[in-house]
Image: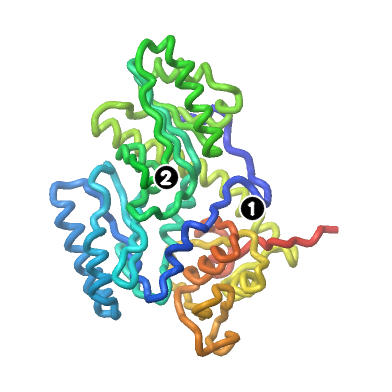
Amino acid sequence: MRHQGGEPGRPTRAGPHAMELGFLEPLYRAADPVATVYLDTTRGSADATHGIGRRWRALRAGLEGHGADEATLRALDGAVGGATGVPGPQGEALFASGGELIAAYTLSRPPAEDRASWWPVADPIELVADLDDTLAYVFVAADRSGADIHAYPENGGPSGERHFNGATLHISKVRGGGRRHEYDRRGTEGVWSDDAAQTVREVERAVDEIGAGVVFLGGDERAAGMIRDRFSERTRRILVEVRAGGRGDRGAMVELRSAVEQGLRETAVALRAGVVLDFLGDLEHPGLAVQGFADTAAALRSGGVGRLLLSAGRRDEPTLWASTSDPLELARTRAELTEPGEALEAPASALLLRAAQATRSAFTLLPESADATNGAGALLRFSPVRG
């Protein structure tokens, strides 16, 4: 795998790698408690289906023990199990409440561990972390007879059916009007010397339509080279050539998906690094950034957060309190709320994400190695001019 245009540049304070959190709104709309399930649904062995079912039943029993109602559990029964058409590692994130499935996501990789929770609000931190490794991208798989072109916008929202993160969509060939966020063009068939230019036009149109941050090109080396040589300079700057897979059998697709997933993560990490550097630098200047759950909650409460930063996977995460009706009413204790009688308690990350979504703040995953108190912080929306 090689980058044609070098490493992605460091984004500005409002840089390109800014996850918008609007897709979380349906998860936080539920009036009843929400069941959140994270499950490894990799189908790498003959008895994978049995293993997934067994592990789901253990999670189901735990949810029932914490008070989840049977109707909601049945809704999860009907959705659990992942996507049978996706080769290689995968996971899923499911959200259900009031007897209905709110959203089902196939994750680009398994969760750190199988887990399920029953809280007053959804617990989407691992879903958000998985999505933060994705970008708007175009993928081109070429051979001597044609090319498949697939373009996927960043962070498409729930649409009433299963969603796919990362590079899973182009592998499973998911289509249909329900997935309104998918752009799928196929069929540049015929003599390659005539059709390569048409393929390039389709690719560059897709790049424009979705604002792609990276273009992956893989498959037959000669066919891919004919396409590459015709790309504009702008497209070459975001081009990554994938030396794996093709348009062939399932084995080739597994190899291809793995290469694209790696490329997506490497690109996302490079872009995210600039945001984290901004954050760590701005912590040294009062009024530019804050860190820790308490100060981040206070900044969200005032509507001053431009970008929320959180790390994922911490076992010692505290809880916060919030108003049932106002996502910005956040506090460390119930007594600090304006209306203590109308309050809910949930994991800090869930309530910080709820407030960030309500204020249209962007999100960036904070690496575990970043030196930030509690693995939480924010770049502030209104920054003073430095002297």
163 left or right of 152 in image: left
Residue type pointed to by label 1: Leu
Specify the quadrant of the image occupied by residue 183. Answer: top left
Q: Nearer the viewer, mark 1 or mark 2?
A: 2
The single residue placed furthest to the front in the displayed view is 177
Gap between marks 1 and 2, in whole Å?
A: 35 Å
Q: Is residue 294 visible?
A: yes
273 left or right of 76 in image: right
Comparing 19 with 32, the one in front is 32
Element at badge 2?
loop
Comparing 233 with 344, the one in front is 344
Report x, y in % for residue 289.
Answer: 68, 64
Q: Which label belongs to residue 277?
A: 1
**In the picture shown, does residue 240 fall above or below 74?**
above
Comparing 289 with 298, the one in front is 298
Q: Quadrant of the N terminus?
A: top left
Question: Callout 1: few (<14), some (14-19), or many (20+) C-alpha neighbours within 10 Å?
Answer: few
Q: Is residue 213 visible?
A: no
Name which residue lies at 45% across and 36% down. Answer: 151
Name which residue lies at 62% across and 39% down. Answer: 9
Q: Tag 2 or tag 1, which sits nearer the N-term?
A: 2
Comparing 135 with 155, the one in front is 155
The single residue placed furthest to the right in the displayed view is 387
Name which residue lies at 47% across and 46% down. Answer: 134
Name which residue lies at 60% across and 64% down. Answer: 359
**In the picture shown, does residue 296 fall above or below 342?**
above
Residue type pointed to by label 2: Arg
Q: Which label belongs to residue 62?
A: none
- Count every numbered label the image shows and give the total: 2
Question: Callout 2: few (<14), some (14-19), or many (20+) C-alpha neighbours within 10 Å?
Answer: few
The residue identified by callout 2 is 180
